[in-house]
Image (cartoon, rainbow, N blue to C red):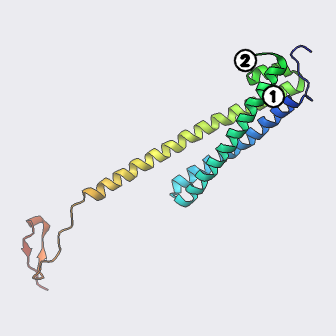
Amino acid sequence: MLGTLTPTTSAAAELLDLLHEEQTRFDTFLTLLTRERDCLRSLSPSELETLTAAKLALLTEIQTLEQRRVRVVASLAAEWGVPVDTLTLQAIAKRMGGPAGEDCRRRQQQLNATLDAIREASAVNGSVISKSLAFLDQALSLVRSRPAAAPIYSPSAGLVSAAHDGALIERKG
């Protein structure tokens, strides 16, 4: 059984379970990014705060899963007597062989597709944020540069004309 792993090996089973858990978390993260984009477009800051907190918590979970995966891969490397840096998911799937190897390859492909979708959704959200900030900056510039409104009536109750540098225009009636 040189380098071949049966599906019942605990490290292999744990790796497949971890890949499934990571996929679940990344799917949830992608859903949060979609909801975030909707909040950005509808200008819903309170929901945006909630989503940001949920994303941070989820990233912490993903980090924990990734750390566990690194330990499992190190365990497989020790078991197989190979350097840990040579064990990519493809290399592991090849060594596993059979249905477990195919499952590992399929999960890797699914994770890669989800991560690509996350990158794309993040880029879209970044663009929406950038455009929103540019719009708000422009709006604030207009508000800041607007001259103070001149009084419409003078102290003597005459109408002030802005076209005549504040000269009084008398009106009857």
Q: Residue at coordinates 9% horizontally, 65% vertically from top-left?
A: 165
Label number found at residue 104: 1
Left or right, 82 with respect to 168, comes to: right
Element type at mark 2: helix
Left or right, 163 with respect to 56, comes to: left
Q: Specify few, some or many for label 2: CA neighbours under 10 Å numbering under 14, 14-19, or 20 or more.
A: few
Q: Residue at coordinates 69% horizontally, 31% vertically from top-left?
A: 112
Visible residue check, residue 139: yes
Q: Amino acid at mark 1?
A: Cys
Visible residue check, residue 105: no
Q: Relative to 30, is 105 above or below?
A: above
Label number found at residue 86: 2
The quadrant in which the N terminus is found is top right
In whole angstroms, how far apart are the C-alphas of marks 1 and 2?
A: 16 Å
Left or right, 123 with respect to 166, comes to: right
Q: Residue at coordinates 65% horizontally, 35% vertically from top-left?
A: 115
Q: Nearer the viewer, residue 57 or 28?
A: 57
Q: Amino acid at mark 2?
A: Thr
Q: Nearer the viewer, mark 1 or mark 2?
A: 2
Element type at mark 1: helix
Q: Quadrant of residue 89?
A: top right
Q: Relative to 11, is 52 above or below?
A: below
